[in-house]
Amino acid sequence: MKKTIALLCLNFLWAIAFCQLQSGEIEASKLPEPGGGHYAAEYNLDVAVEPGAWLKVAPGMHAGFGSVDELYFRSEVPQIQNESASFTIAGWKGERLNAQIVVWSPEELQQVRFSVSDLKNERGEILSKNIIGLKMISYVVSNFPYGSKEANCGGSPYKTGWLMPDRFENFERFDVPAKSVRPIWLSANIPATAKPGNYKGTIDVSSKQGHAKLQINIRVQNQTLPKPHDWKYRLDLWQNPWIIADYYHVKPWSDEHMMLLKKHTQLYADAGAAFITTYGVHSPWAGGEYGIERGMIEWIKRKDGSWKFDYTIFDKYVELCMNLGIDKAITVYTPLPFSGTFRYVDEATGNFVDEVWTPGSDTFSINWHKFLTDLRTHLEKKGWFKKTYIGLNENAMDVTLEAIRMIKSHSKDWKITYAGDWHPELDTALSDFCFKYGKEANKDEVKTRSLRGQTTTYYVCCEPAKPNTFLFSPPIEGRWISWYVAAHGYDGFVRWAFDAWPADPLRDARYGSWAAGDCYIVYPGGNSSIRFEKLREGIADYEKMRILRELVAKSNNTSAKKRLAELDAHLQTLNGETEFNEDKLKNDVKKGRQLVDQISEMLAL
């Protein structure tokens, strides 16, 4: 009992200290490890700051536009040239444009507020200020330093933590502690009905200690980006809806859980999500350090030995996602759970029973054939069969081939999706093949799959270290990921996971064996992040390139055709990326975006 009380007190003190740290009431120093700790944590929570750097900053409030491709650390004087008071960006109707505003001061700032004006063009037409959203960017603890090349699928070699700006949250006003920085994320959602033209507006930043007026200029081009639901990009961020119930301590699949899930999943839908992640078996990944993916279809063995299957949870989740516009594909995981164990309810006793059904055995084939027969009947009644895939996670090749043989022996109509290294022997059997970055088929093999009507994507996970979407990854990597999709001829991108949160995701992204941010890219409360928005930017880039190709093919505009050829040549240079120099990646995307903008303008004439 004494040990428990002491542990609770330690956690309470850590929480107070971290909140003070976020607000700047205390300086970064030694804080006890959350939960009592497995080691004595020596926190390096802030980046190294040049001695005396803040002494060179003039008193009062400073505010300016930074770059969405930079992370602005809490105690580092931001390197913003001339405190940029103006920001200009071009975009399509229907597109979301992003900017980052940075506020900093050598002294405490009180009651910092933002006020946004309407934007007007040269003809007096207006873009309402309501298209602009502002989110405060909060700092979260990472277990690797910025830009680390050491991340892998093992534990972190560091016993330190670094504060990284990432998590979005709402605000009305905020204070800025002395010698610190507060970044703000600005998103402008251009209406599909907007008139083309150059629009100008202002953003007033005020505090008790000073005032700044910033100007934002948006050039609306005469092209339209469809709604995310109509994007062709196949985005597959694996979801675990159980984690929402666990985090909020609500009954799974209750009205409260469904309400929370709706807001949470809307973020995924708004990025053009294609795949719904469902679990046909309990714990497909053999458990997790902070939560288990529980089954959505309950297997019940009746007293007479026959099977019945309960789809209540499965239907609830699929219907919720489809109502949000996520309706292109459903993946059911998996005939190959990592543990090899299958759980069912024994109707006679009401108990769970866990049994090992070895792929290739009669038990495995017989039981899975019964399930697939029932599942197909249910899916056809719901009208979902043609968009459903049986998901196979990477296993030994003989086991994988046995699972494929079993599925196809049941019916050749089943679609199969598989994430893993490129294996030629799996090629024709998989309707959807997702390669691990660096373990891929070549472009000709990807093209051949497309000609056969098969889809192909790629993924990153706890490795490679680069490119990735870790908390400490340079933001440009998240956007570059989809430029590589376009360069290699892929249909989309896959990432585990959307929301596999650790114990305290709002403050501490470290996740046991995994690199910070590996397991989740959005936060509780339906809150986005720099990483998620950068990924979404790249997806929009991909869609714009796809649409421009279609428009150029129908056009006689020789200048646009020439620029498209330049864009294609530029994309080919991305296929040989090996060093992932941050500046080069920025230039890769910058040059590509310039070409996209030029083609957009040419075709609008």
Image: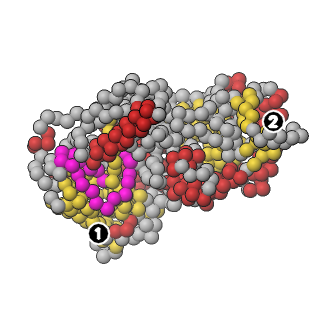
Where 132 sits versus 368, above or below? below
Quarter of the image where one finds residue 531: top left
* Residue under the image location 27 percent in, 57 percent down: 174
Q: Magenta region, mostly helix, strand or loop?
A: strand
Q: Report helix, strand or loop for mark 2.
A: helix
Q: Report helix, strand or loop for mark 1.
A: loop
Label 1 or label 2, whichever comes before in sequence order: 1
Label total for image: 2
Q: Is residue 601 left or right of residue 438?
A: left
Identify the residue under disc 1.
117
Frontmost residue, 50 versus 421: 50
* Residue under the image location 78 percent in, 46 percent down: 309
Q: Kindly tell me whether residue 560 is visible in this rendering.
A: yes
Q: Residue 420: x percent and y percent?
A: 59, 31
Could you classify mark 1 by the number of other residues whose Cα lies within 10 Å: few (under 14), some (14-19), or many (20 or more)? Answer: some
Q: Residue 219: x percent and y percent?
A: 33, 62
Identify the residue under disc 2.
367
- Residue 537 is labelled as none
- Range of magenta residues: 166-184
Quarter of the image where one finds residue 452: top right
Frontmost residue, 34 versus 441: 34
How far is disc 1 from disc 2 in space, using C-alphas? 63 Å
Q: Is residue 362 left or right of residue 297?
A: right
Could you classify mark 2 by the number of other residues whose Cα lies within 10 Å: few (under 14), some (14-19), or many (20 or more)? Answer: few
* Residue under the image location 36 percent in, 71 percent down: 128
Q: Quick check: is 182 in the magenta stretch?
A: yes
